[in-house]
Image (tube, rainbow, N blue to C red):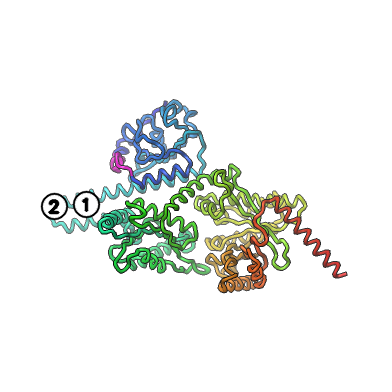
């Protein structure tokens, strides 16, 4: 067994470790939450926050392991802190450094190991965030990136602890120094207070930070137990805030954050607290009052003021919040539990519809666990052939004939069955997996087009959605051209659908890419029109061919005069711009009749057909061709 060397800066490293105050400290939910997430996300039985002391590795947090420490000389983390890059061991039993290590030959029977170094605030390696499996495996690049991200969260927790310790220490020193020289306390308090303020507040907005919110919640819990008055903890997350940065620049986005802080702060009552906990996230503590016994009502007023429109190039961006709430004492009896539950509810609100308030329930915790499981398994879905494509027909509303298909990705999970796209596509977008998945769907659809043509079928165009990352971050023009050429498919048979937000994320590059695709002969369409930010004035500048109306408007047409008027107006304006219009989601005869009356061009919906597997599409194409031929023959008979 190869024992790890002692690093050259061992004395400074050990001093930095001691300065964190972590060694021997009690378990903390904030650390444990990260190791639980790592284990579930990477689908491993063991995840640890390992701190390398003089003669031992001690686990600040552990998931899936009973022991709290091991000797340092047998630790793989002792090897990891000698490196600058993460240490990944696919199979320790086949690695000469570890094959006879007691942790490999005995409990926990370690085979796979991956450890990302943890740094103290003065950049000393104090340990690792590591994951362990009892079977050999490889670590995908995306999984390693996820582990790095989680390690950075652990470091932020360590930094906050060290800054708080330093602030208290310096404050004490300042008081002692001024007392030694017979100086009055107020000046010393002012100097120490300034430092403590910096440690406990967000510099941009001036709001308290997460640590201050934790302290306030703990104090509120004590009062709640004494007086029985409930309080509410809320997590407010700005929807699509990354897009604000992309469209408006960081300086304007920062100004928006400051304005949000001021507007919300103005609505708070005495004893309530607003804090900023992340780049696009705020926390609120609201207390019940005699005149307002339900803190939820106060949050609704805040929501009404916070949601508004922001001017942007080509139109406006809707500024909305997804809010999750946890009620004390019902949803938790400590600050970490309440904040964690509020965040869980916020994520559910964001995944469902955005711009809504979602109260916490135990069912959400189960759903959150399922989401983490799906995120982990989605990384393997492509390589294990679990994804497949179905094709939903589009029908010409004038002739009733087949006019195209849309390629729709599906996921057949070995345990959960077929997963809905609206459940796994947001996960793919958040994790970056949307790029390889979108590339695979595009490749599959173009290949299928080539196979239908080779079989002699009367092929119609197939539409494929392009993700934002796929559209803006890759050489999509060259990729599409190569795919069409390799499959012997004419460009006119491929339709690429973009969302409104994709076209606005980088207007100049969007224009260049769209023109390049148009020059190939590919058809371009804007998807889900009416749910984003663009206006017809903006669309007029883009080289588009089609516009697809979002299904929410089509669904409401039968009982909403407003939705009907919106659809009629969209169709009329689109036709003036020489754009064909596709309606998505039509299911009833009344909806189809209304769309025909509005002179909509095509319909994609269950009224005509559900999404079909490729083989069934071939039969659909043949049946459509037969009907078309019969109609043509009957027309010829009438003419004769």
Q: What is the secondary structure assignment of the residue under circle 2?
A: helix
Q: Residue at x 46, y 56 (%)?
A: 348
Crowd tier of the residue under label 1, counting other residues whose Cα lies within 10 Å: few below 14, some 14–19, many 20 or above: many
Q: Quadrant of the N terminus?
A: top left
Disc on the earlier residue, 2 or 1: 1
In the rendered image, residue 412, in percent from the top left (x then y), is placed at 59, 47
Crowd tier of the residue under label 2, counting other residues whose Cα lies within 10 Å: few below 14, some 14–19, many 20 or above: few
Q: Does residue 18 belong to the magenta stretch?
A: yes
Q: Is residue 107 visible?
A: yes
In this view, which residue lies farthest toward the left? 182
Q: Is residue 198 visible?
A: no
Q: Residue at label 1? A: 171
Q: Quadrant of the C terminus?
A: bottom right
Q: Does residue 545 belong to the magenta stretch?
A: no
Q: Nearer the viewer, residue 599 or 74?
A: 599
Q: Residue at label 2? A: 179
């Amino acid at each position: 067994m190869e024992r790890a060397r002692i690093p050259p800066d061992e004395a400074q490293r050990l001093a930095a470790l001691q300065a964190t105050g972590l060694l021997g400290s009690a378990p903390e939910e904030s650390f444990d939450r990260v190791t639980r997430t790592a284990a579930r996300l990477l689908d491993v039985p063991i995840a640890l926050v390992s701190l390398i002391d003089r003669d031992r590795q001690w686990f600040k947090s552990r998931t899936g392991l009973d022991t709290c420490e091991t000797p340092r000389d047998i630790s793989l983390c002792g090897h990891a802190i000698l490196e600058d890059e993460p240490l990944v061991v696919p199979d320790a039993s086949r690695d000469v450094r570890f094959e006879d290590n007691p942790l490999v030959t005995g409990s926990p029977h370690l085979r796979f190991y991956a450890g990302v170094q943890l740094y103290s605030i003065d950049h000393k390696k104090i340990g690792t965030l590591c994951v362990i499996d009892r079977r050999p495996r490889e670590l995908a690049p995306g999984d390693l990136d996820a582990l790095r991200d989680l390690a950075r969260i652990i470091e932020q927790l360590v930094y906050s602890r060290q800054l708080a310790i330093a602030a208290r220490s310096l404050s004490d020193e300042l008081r002692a120094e001024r007392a030694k020289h017979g100086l009055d306390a107020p000046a010393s308090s002012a100097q120490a207070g300034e430092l403590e303020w910096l440690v406990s507040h967000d510099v941009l907005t001036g709001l308290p930070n997460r640590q201050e919110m934790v302290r306030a919640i703990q104090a509120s819990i004590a009062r709640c137990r004494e007086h029985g008055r409930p309080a509410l903890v809320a997590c407010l997350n700005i929807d699509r805030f990354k897009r604000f940065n992309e469209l408006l620049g960081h300086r304007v986005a920062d100004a928006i954050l400051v304005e949000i802080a001021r507007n919300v702060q103005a609505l708070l009552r005495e004893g309530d607290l607003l804090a900023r906990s992340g780049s696009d996230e705020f926390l609120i503590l609201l207390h019940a009052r005699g005149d307002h016994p339900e803190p939820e009502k106060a949050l609704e007023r805040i929501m009404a003021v916070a949601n508004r429109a922001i001017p942007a190039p080509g139109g406006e961006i809707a500024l909305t919040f997804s809010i999750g709430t946890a009620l004390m004492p019902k949803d938790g009896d400590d600050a970490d539990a309440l904040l964690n539950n509020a965040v869980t509810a916020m994520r559910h609100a964001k995944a469902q519809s955005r711009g809504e308030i979602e109260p916490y329930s135990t069912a959400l915790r189960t759903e959150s666990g399922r989401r983490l499981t799906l995120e982990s398994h989605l990384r393997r879905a492509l390589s294990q052939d679990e994804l497949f494509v179905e094709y939903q027909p589009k029908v010409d509303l004038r002739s009733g004939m087949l006019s195209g298909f849309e390629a729709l990705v599906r996921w057949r999970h070995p345990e959960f069955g077929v997963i809905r796209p609206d459940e796994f596509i947001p996960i793919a977008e958040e994790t970056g997996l949307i790029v390889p998945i979108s590339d695979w769907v595009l490749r599959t659809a173009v290949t299928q087009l080539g196979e239908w043509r080779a079989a002699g079928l009367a092929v119609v165009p197939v539409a494929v959605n392009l993700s934002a990352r796929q559209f803006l971050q890759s050489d999509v023009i060259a990729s599409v051209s190569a795919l069409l050429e390799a499959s012997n498919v004419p460009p006119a048979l491929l339709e690429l659908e973009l969302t409104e937000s994709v076209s606005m994320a980088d207007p100049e590059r969007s224009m260049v890419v769209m023109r390049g695709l148009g020059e190939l002969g590919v058809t371009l369409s804007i998807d889900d029109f009416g749910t984003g930010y663009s206006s017809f004035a903006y669309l007029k500048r883009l080289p588009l061919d089609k516009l697809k109306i979002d299904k929410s408007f089509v669904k409401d047409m039968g009982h909403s005069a407003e939705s009907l008027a919106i659809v009629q107006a969209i169709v009329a304006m689109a036709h003036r711009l020489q754009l064909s219009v596709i309606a998505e989601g039509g299911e009833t005869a009344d909806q189809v009749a209304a769309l025909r009356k509005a002179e909509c061009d095509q319909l994609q919906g269950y009224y005509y057909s559900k999404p079909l597997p490729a083989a069934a599409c071939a039969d659909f194409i043949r049946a459509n061709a037969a009907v078309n031929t019969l109609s043509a023959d009957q027309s010829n008979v009438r003419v004769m």
